[in-house]
Image (tube, rainbow, N blue to C red):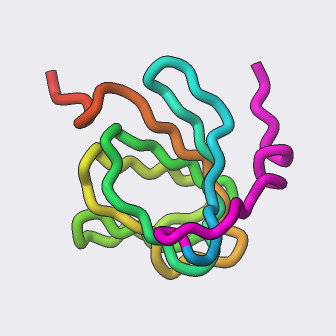
Amino acid sequence: MKIPFSENLSKLPLPATKKWPEGVWDTEALKHGSMSLILFAPEGNDHQTPHTQDELYLVIEGSGVLEVEGTEFSFERGDALFVKAGEKHRFTQFEKGLTMWAVFWGDEGGETNA
C-alpha cells in the first residue's frame, strides 16, 4: 500500500479550532488497528497535549527542538523522535516548512518494558 505524501500535505491546514487557532496542521493518512499514521506540518505555535499512545516522529524536512517533559532535543531532517504515551511535549524553534510523519500505536497508556 502506498500513502502519498503530496496528497496528504495538500490537505493542510485544516480549519482553525479553539485548540489550534492558526489551523490544524496534521491529517490522518492511515489507520490500521491501533496504529495511526499522521502527516504533521506545524506552522505558528505547537499546541500539543500529551497523547494516550506511544509516538514516533520521522522528520522529512526542517529542523527545530522537541521539548519532552522539560528536556530539549535538537533535531534535523532525517531524524527520528520518540515520545512515550502521556509525556508532555511540543515542538519549538522550528523552521517554516517543518514536515514529519507521526506514528501512533499500541495500547492506551503506551507499551511497558517487558
- Identify the residue shown where x is 55% and y is 20%: 32
- Identify the residue shown where x is 35% and y is 26%: 106
Query: For this rendering, which residue is in front, 8 or 5?
Result: 8
Find the residue positioned furthest to the left: 114
Query: Residue 11 location in percent, x, y?
Result: 79, 53
Say if 31 sits above or below 64 in the image.
above
Most frequent secondary structure within the magenta stretch: loop
Query: Residue 103 location in percent, x, y?
Result: 51, 38
Say if 61 sits above or below 30 in the image.
below
Residue 5 is one of the magenta-drawn residues: yes
Quick check: 32 left or right of 1?
Answer: left
Residue 114 is one of the magenta-drawn residues: no
Find the residue positioned furthest to the front: 18
Identify the image quadrant of the N terminus: top right
Query: For this rendering, which residue is in front, 89 or 20?
Result: 20
> Magenta part of the protein: which range?
1-20
- Identify the residue shown where x is 84% and y is 44%: 7
Query: Residue 85 location in percent, x, y?
Result: 28, 44
Residue 104 in view here: yes
Residue 62 in view here: no
Place residue 12 in its image quadrant. bottom right
Identify the image quadrant of the C terminus: top left
Query: Residue 57 location in percent, x, y?
Result: 50, 48
